[in-house]
Image (cartoon, rainbow, N blue to C red):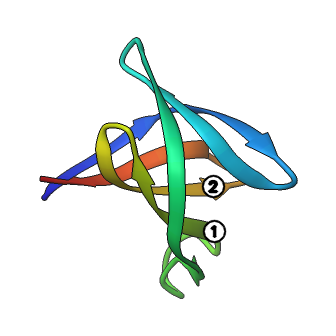
Amino acid sequence: MKFLLEPIDVAQRNGLPTIICWRGGAYDVEQVLDRWSARGPWWGSDEQRRYLLLITTSGVMEIFHSSISGWMLSRIFD
């Protein structure tokens, strides 16, 4: 597993990601494994994040979206 926190572009259909664009590649989303929401700690930003765990053509990716940072790739799993 690798922690990344890198910006990504996400194509969506009906509010769900269909393609993840990262580092010059485009990866189809095959399945949404899980989704959840989280907030930052009380002493920091109160940023609401919407997380998704995805199976893509590149492997398993954890991404999130927030109003502050937009779409980000959080982790990839080997």
Q: Work out which residue is located at the far right of the displayed protein and give it.
A: 14
| Amino acid type indicated by mark 2 | His
Q: To which residue does mark 2 refer?
A: 65
Circle 1 Cα neighbour tier, 10 Å, few/some/many (<14 / 14–19 / ≥20)? some
Q: Residue at x 82, y 55 (%)?
A: 15
Nearest to the observer: residue 7 or residue 30: 30
Label 2: element kind: strand
Residue 61, horizontal then vertical, whole percent: 36, 53
Residue 50 - label: 1
Numbered-mark total: 2
**25 relative to 65, above or below:** above
Query: What is the three-letter code of the residue carrying label 1?
Result: Arg
SS state under label 1 = strand
Residue 68's x, y, as percent? Answer: 67, 50
Q: Quadrant of residue 49?
A: bottom right
Against 57, residue 66 (above or below) is below
Nearer the observer, 60 or 24: 60
Residue visible at 59% across and 44% down? 71
At 46% from the left and 59% from the top, the residue drawn is 54
Residue at image point 50% right, 74% down = 44
Q: Is residue 52 above or below residue 15?
A: below
Residue 60 lies, in percent from the top left, at 31, 55
Q: Where does residue 43 sit, x and y in percent of width and height?
A: 49, 83
Would residue 5 appear left or right of 69 to someone viewing this image? left
Q: Earlier in the sequence, mark 2 or mark 1?
A: 1
